[in-house]
Image: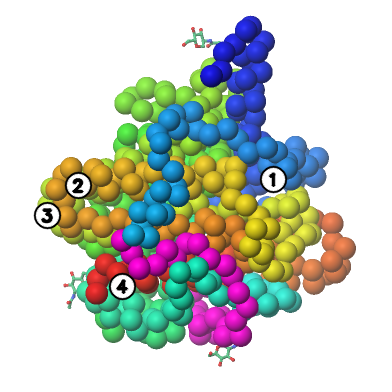
Amino acid sequence: MVTFNSFKDQTLFLTKKFLPWTLYILLPFALLRLFFSPLPFLPPPDSNLPHASLLTIPSLSPPPPPPPSSSSDFTAEEAGAKQASISPCDYFNGKWFRDRRGPLYNDTTCSTIKHGRNCIAHGRPDLSYLYWRWKPTQCNLPMFDPQAFLQLLINKHLAFVGDSMARNQLESLLCLLSSASTPNLVFQNGEDSKFRRWIFPSHNLTLSIYWSPFLVKGIEKSSEQNYNKLYLDIVDERWASELGQMDLVVLSIGHWFLLPAVYYEFDSVLGCHYCPGMNHTEIGFYEVLRKAFRTALNNIIERKSAKGEAIDVTVTTFSPSHFEGEWDKAGACPKTKPYRKGEKELEGMDSDMRKVEIEEVEAAKEKAKNYKYEGFRLEALDVTKLALMRPDGHPGPYMNPFPFANGGHNQERVQNDCVHWCLPGPIDTWNEIFLEMVKKWRI
Ligand SMILES: *[C@@H]1O[C@H](CO)[C@@H](O)[C@H](O)[C@H]1NC(C)=O
Ligand SMILES: *[C@@H]1O[C@H](CO)[C@@H](O)[C@H](O)[C@H]1NC(C)=O
Ligand SMILES: *[C@@H]1O[C@H](CO)[C@@H](O)[C@H](O)[C@H]1NC(C)=O
């Protein structure tokens, strides 16, 4: 029980409570500039910028407190246990092991690898990160079978909705499937092609990506407005208005919630995150992420059930980043091997983001039951732990071609991507597990 003896204690408590959030904010500042901005890359900033020198703090700081309203007695372990009793295998607990079989594709066989993920073509010298496979404790995870995937989704539309992590997973799937069948790009729109659609004519499978980093209506920060605006009770119609065409949806968001933002709900300001000088209440981002998921999942359930249409929904859980040093210095994510079992625990923000997502998946399942909506299937693609163990799978400096070509490794400043995944890379495993989920649903 927390009691306050004085105003000072209370201030101290609040500072402690919110300190981690203010620290975590420094990371995405860098990320936003690098990865979330569609603008061409700008020269590295002055190294005296506070975020550059403080980037390492999040990993050293104590984990943040649990979200304010974590009073429910639900635990992720229970969710895991529940899942294990239904499905034959828990795919999300296991370990990475060496495997000589390499990836299914490379940049010769797959032409759609996004520039910033094309690590081999960009000269990444160590390639051992390609030779690890995920082994769930209870079973074996089969290698991705593109024919099986295409066969299961004949005449279906699979949509990825979210931020650049959603796009990273979609691009992995596109390459995996391209090894068996050639897709046609049939639609693209938006800055940086944030909305795209392909058809695999061999199976009439439609694959699409919808940019929606909050799932709810939002205005992304820009040069005029230095923070995001989120409308937590209003779904983002850029994807939701097309739900009628979708048979399967993969939702993947998270990193954008770390950025400064003002939150609106029911036409008034609910609070903000990292908005000094704005006279709004700091409320952090965990409960905001929860509300965004709830709005998105509720909208899917309500709209699809009203029309009697079936839909399969997957929530890809939070994918941790692995910055160990400054984002714009060599060696920001230098590891070349996965963590061994027990070497790295899931904790802090990574754990709390995942927890919110798992809880909202469970809540939405309950809601669908109340609606007696049987065409709705929902699972978490709970990759947080798998991803956490793979500090070696990020582009790092190889987000750009041959970053050390002029001047060698002594080069002072080089930008690093320690958030997204190289293609091919560990994220291909997310889709291997996704295929097992689709098999369970559709066979
Ligand atoms: C890419 O994959 C193809 C087919 O597996 C293979 O023949 C080729 O050698 C690979 N290219 C590179 C650069 O590894
Ligand atoms: C292809 O799939 C879409 C749904 O994604 C469906 O509407 C369309 O009728 C299908 N086309 C054919 C020729 O079966
Ligand atoms: C801050 O908000 C409070 C409550 O809405 C209001 O009373 C106060 O005048 C505001 N302060 C400033 C500086 O705007």
The residue carrying mark 4 is 439
Please report the residue visible at 40 percent of the width from the left and 67 percent of the height from the top. 89
The residue carrying mark 2 is 369
Pointer 4 local density, CA inside 10 Å: few below 14, some 14–19, many at least 20: some
Q: CA distance from mark 2 to mark 4?
A: 22 Å
The amino acid type, in three-letter code, at marker 2 is Lys
Point out which mark residue 59 bears: 1
Residue 418 location (% of width, % of height): 65, 58
Q: CA distance from mark 1 to mark 3?
A: 47 Å
The amino acid type, in three-letter code, at marker 4 is Lys
Instruction: Single out the mark in the foreground, 1 or 3.
Output: 1
The residue carrying mark 3 is 308
Q: Is residue 421 left or right of residue 190?
A: right
Which residue is most to the top? 6
Mark 4 secondary-structure assignment:
helix
Of the two numbered discs 3 and 2 on the same chain, state the one appearing first in sequence. Answer: 3
Cβ of mark 4 under 8 A from ligand 2: no
Of the two numbered discs 4 and 3 on the same chain, state the one appearing first in sequence. Answer: 3
Cβ of mark 1 under 8 A from ligand 1: no
Pointer 1 local density, CA inside 10 Å: few below 14, some 14–19, many at least 20: some
Please report the residue visible at 60 percent of the width from the left and 81 percent of the height from the top. 99
Of the two numbered discs 1 and 4 on the same chain, state the one appearing first in sequence. Answer: 1
